[in-house]
Image (cartoon, rainbow, N blue to C red):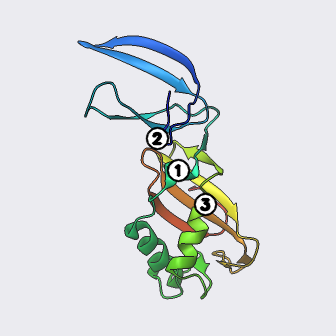
Amino acid sequence: MRTSTGTWTQITATEVHRADDQQVHNLTVDDLHTYYVTPAPQNDLLTHNEARNDDCRFTAEQWADRIDDDGIEHSLSRHSPDGEAYREGKDSVWSGDVDEKRLQDLVNATENETGKIQRNPREDVVEFAMDAGSTIGKTPNGDYTSKYTVIRDYWSGDLITAHPGPPVRPD
């Protein structure tokens, strides 16, 4: 299969199935999660590999332009010192130097990392446990931390949210 940059990647397996009156081709493409298939002019299909072992690896090219203002705004408003959840003692808080640009840099650091697919209770998200290498905020119990979590949409790669501290598991 040829990539958008003109290089070739290996299709490691194919399966053909029938779904109603449609023929379906399942392709396994090594090291690619999301890709377009062009079966005929102007019929591009967005396609996803099944991830193995609940891990998902994405490349910088696949994540390009996937940081939207809603995800950044959600993270900064919820996890800032004046954010409602933080004021109520329920959430972590970013350091004062984590502004929109710094948060985008932190999120972009996930581009070549392996994230964990969360199927329950958060279906269709990929969670990345990251380390900034220096203090970027406080955990809900007030400990300073360099660790942070980024949550992206499984299908599109769009940023859903990010917060200081390790991934939080609901009770």
Helix, strand or loop under label 1: helix
The answer to which of marks 1 and 2 sits earlier in the sequence is: 2
Q: CA separation, marks 1 and 3?
A: 28 Å
The answer to which of marks 1 and 3 sits earlier in the sequence is: 1
Residue 3 pos. (x, y %): 50, 36
Question: Image check: 114 left or right of 7?
Answer: right
- Asked whether the viewer can see residue 114, the reply is yes
| Rendered image quadrant of residue 155 | top left
The label on residue 61 is 1
Residue furthest right as drawn: 133
Q: CA separation, marks 1 and 2?
A: 10 Å
Question: Quick check: marks 1 and 2 in contact, CB under 8 Å?
Answer: yes
Q: Residues within 10 Å of mark 1 (few under 14, many from 20)?
A: few
Question: Image check: 28 left or right of 39?
Answer: right
For discs 1 and 2, the disc positioned in front in the rendered view: 2
The label on residue 4 is 2
Question: Image check: 87 left or right of 57?
Answer: left
Residue 110 pos. (x, y %): 61, 57
Helix, strand or loop under label 2: loop
Q: Nearer the viewer, residue 141 or 68?
A: 68
Q: Residues within 10 Å of mark 2 (few under 14, many from 20)?
A: few
Residue type, label 2: Ser
Residue 67 pos. (x, y %): 45, 63
Q: Which residue position is annotated with label 3?
A: 168
Number of marks in picture: 3
Residue type, label 1: Glu
The answer to which of marks 3 and 2 sits earlier in the sequence is: 2
Q: Nearer the viewer, residue 58 or 155?
A: 58
- Residue at 72% over, 73% down: 146
